Image: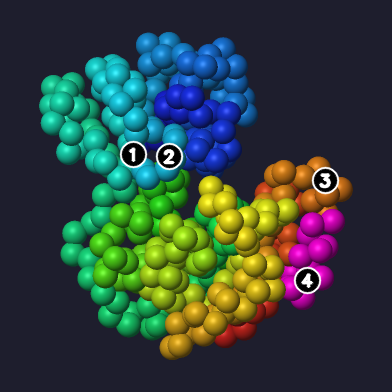
Amino acid sequence: MQKRFLILAEGYSHDPHYGKTMRGIVRYRRDEVVAILDSKRAGEEYDAVPIVGSVTDALAYEPDTALVGVAVAGGRLGPEWRALLHDAISAGLDVEAGMHEFLADDPELSLLAHERGVELRDTRRPPDGLSVPTGANLELDAAVVLTVGSDCAVGKKTMALELDREARSRGIRSVFVPTGQTGIMIAGWGIAVDAVVADFLAGAAERLVVEGARRGDLLWVEGQGALLHPQFSGVTLGLYHGSAPHALVLCHVAGQTEIEGCPGHALPSLPELVRLYEAVSLPARPATVAAVALNTSLLDDEGARAAVADAERETGLVADDPVRFGAGRLVDAVLARLPGQAPR
């Protein structure tokens, strides 16, 4: 049965960074989104989806699930959200959230949910039984491609989704492999690897690609963090080695020169990032960067095309913005780099 989502985006429906969960759900599960809640923009629309000011106002659109559509630093919601969650549960809505603090572990909210007969789903909760990799990641028949980034929040999930969409349009048994809470909400399965005990992170990534290989022949693994990020580099390397990709797609915001939120931490050039990511690949499965996926959302069309040309000249690789210009050239470049594994 198809869900009917009310996306809770209080204060962030305008924000492409902290509202990225909302935007991802709207773009990739559009038919299931009936309304967005943000009291600061009530009466407006986002991408033709109505924005309402309260849970009560949203009920006219007959939602059955309230989905927390913000991704805040540290993965924890502020106290002002308790009333909003209370209203959603009281209205008989299931609630999905991807926070590090699990709603189902909150005594007050879980009791209310039990009384109202609704479910609290914490998409960031790791599954039981995780351990270290077994080597199964190196024995799969599927081709594995990982999106990696110059920084956090540059579009690694979006790029993987766009590349998967393009591959599926060609009749390839392609699969998006979700590794974060938003990706899980979009795909309906996955593991949020940033919530896994560090020792088992690579094992969780292995489990994901093994499951992905059951679903298809070409796996686009959603990247996390960035290798040189001073706060979130740990998840990047564990995911990289655990998924054991055959190839990488390097994601970057065109024009960005410094790590977001970390003043003084300059970004290396694109060629330096290519060399770095290739150098730290798993020795048992050396990976190369097949293409550069640019996020040109800060530029106009002329500037975006110039940025693509600059990236290609700097790296010698195919570059493009798959959201703006389509993912065809990038998929072609990846498939060409996978002659032994790539499905056609």
Q: Position of residue 25 (x, y in %)?
A: 49, 39
Residue at 71% of width from left, 54% of height from top? 254
The amino acid pointed to by label 3 is Asp
Q: Which residue is outermost to the bottom?
A: 284
Residue at numbered disc 2: 72
Q: Position of residue 58 (x, y in %)?
A: 43, 16
- Mark found first going from the N terminus, 3 or 2: 2
Viewer-side residue, 284 vs 48: 284
The amino acid pointed to by label 1 is Arg
Q: Position of residue 105 (x, y in %)?
A: 17, 38
Q: CA distance from mark 4 to mark 2?
A: 34 Å
Its colouring scheme is rainbow
**Tag 3 secondary structure:** helix
Overall secondary structure of the magenta section: helix
Q: Determine whether label 1 and label 2 are within 8 Å by CB.
A: yes
Position of the C terminus, as image quadrant, is bottom right
- Mark found first going from the N terminus, 1 or 4: 1
Q: Would residue 116 appear left or right of 157 to someone viewing this image?
A: left
Position of the N terminus, as image quadrant, is top left
Residue at numbered disc 4: 314
Q: Nearer the viewer, mark 1 or mark 3?
A: 1
The amino acid pointed to by label 2 is Val
Viewer-side residue, 109 vs 184: 109
Residue at 30% of width from left, 45% of height from top? 100
Residue at 48% of width from left, 21% of height from top? 38
Residue at numbered disc 3: 301
Disc 2 packing (10 Å; few <14; some 14–19; many ≥20): some
